[in-house]
Structure formats: structure tokens, C-alpha cells
Image (cartoon, rainbow, N blue to C red):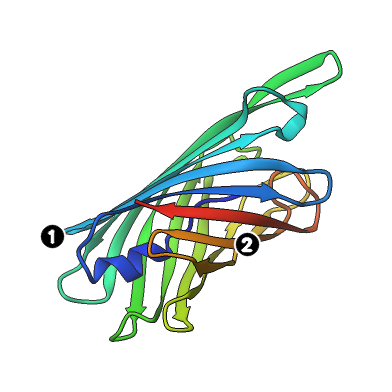
Amino acid sequence: MKKLVLVFIASLFAFGAFSQNIQTHYDMGDGRGYLTSTVEMFKPDKTGNTFFFIDFDYGSGGVENSPSLAYFEIARCFTLGKSPFSWHVEYNGGFGQWKAGNASGAYSISNAWLTGIDYSWNAKDFSKGFSLKALYKNIANTMDSKPNSFQLTGVWYINFAKGKMRFDGFADLWREKTGFGKMIFLTEPQLWYNCTQKFAVGSEVEISSNFAGHDGFMINPTLAVKYTF
């Protein structure tokens, strides 16, 4: 499960408001059946905006009674004048553990540093918008002889049905040498029904290729709830 998407950056920036939410997803993917919680925060200011999220998996990798994975991303955008472009800087990384019978172990998600250019567009009423990012990516402890890579990211949001429904998500494509190939693709579209101004129910579908140690194409849906503070 990935991040809690950056779509709030585009829509909330217009209102200059602080936003924080927590999501809980039940992963229904093949061989999964565990919970993931996510806390995310977005805060704009006079020079740009800051976004972060923290994911915890509970029950993946055969681990019980404790978080089995922790993942963190933080990003900062510095606006470039009055243009729709901004300078984007980002860090992500994490760690996890696994258990199989009497055997157990731990692993790390390599530190990654990213920087590049972001272009964002929003409708005048902020009912929809998107963001495109072209980023340089440096991945520590990669299997590749050269840690330097790239990442292309697209983010979108659409509010409809008089604000009762929201469709949002992101798509990432990056190069990273793995046991299965060098190009990795990940997208996580989400669909939400806003029961109240703060509480929503919905679903996320993780669609990936060569992601998280899996060879080839995967689809993993979730059922989710979200509370916005």
C-alpha cells in the first residue's frame, strides 16, 4: 500500500488551509488480508507546501501482534514565482519484518532522495486538477552499480456528485534494478464517498508491475475509511 496520495496538495493549496487525515485500509489482495493505517499531513505557506505520510502494515509477512512494515515519505515544494511550476524535493524510506514458521527476519526499504520540477493545474472551482512531476532519484543500497535514477509521477483529483464523491490517485514510474527488471510501475486510484464533511468510506486499488519484490503485474484492492481532522 502506498502512500496517501498527494492529490490534497493541489486542491487544498487554494484555500491556504492545514489538512491532516488518517485512513485505514483492509487489503483484499491475493494472499494478503491485513490492515494498513496511514496518517498524512499537508500544509501550504507563503513559499510553497509541505506534505508527508506514514504507512503501517499490520499482519503482512506472517507477522502478528505488531506492525510488520513502516514506510515514510516527506516532500516539499517551493513555488517558482507566480507560475504553475515548483521545485520539488522528497525523501522516502522504511523497514519491515517477516516470519515463516520458526524463522524470522527484518529488512529495510532503501533511503531514496528525489528532486525535480512539478507542474500543477486546477480548475477555477477546484473541482478537479492534476500534477505532473519529473524527478531525479537517488536510491541508496541499490543492486544497480549506479544509484542515480529517475521517477515520473502523475497525481489527479476529481470531485463530483455535488461534492459527495471524490476520485483521486497517483501513478509512479521509475527505474530501479531488482530481481525482476529495471522499470517499476505503481498506481493507486481511490474512490471515496463523503458521508460527512470529515468522514468518508471508499476503496483503493493498487495496480503495479515489478513492485515490492513481486515479478510482473499485480492488482490488490482494499476497503477503506478516512477521517479528516
Percent x, y of residue 108: 59, 29
Mark closest to the chain's N terminus, 2 or 1: 1
Q: Is residue 108 visible?
A: no
The residue at 22%/69% (across/down) is 15
Percent x, y of residue 224: 60, 55
Q: Is residue 6 visible?
A: yes
In the rendered view, tell whether residue 22 sits above or below residue 120: above
Res 46 → quadrant:
bottom left
Horizontally, residue 49 falls left or right of residue 56, namely left
The residue at 60%/38% (across/down) is 142
The residue at 27%/76% (across/down) is 84
Q: Which residue is mark 2?
A: 203
Secondary structure, mark 1, is loop
Would you say the residues marked 2 and 1 are in contact, meaning their CB atoms lie under 8 Å apart? Answer: no
Residue 111 is labelled as none
Residue occupying the far top of the picture: 102
Camera-near label (2 vs 1) is 2
Residue 46 is labelled as 1
Percent x, y of residue 172: 56, 61
In the rendered view, tell whether residue 65 sits above or below residue 123: above
Secondary structure, mark 2, is strand
Q: Residues within 10 Å of mark 1 (few under 14, many from 20)?
A: few
Type of the residue with mark 1: Lys
Res 123 → quadrant:
bottom left
Foreground pick, 157 / 94: 157
Q: Residues within 10 Å of mark 2 (few under 14, many from 20)?
A: many
Type of the residue with mark 2: Ser
Percent x, y of residue 127: 38, 81
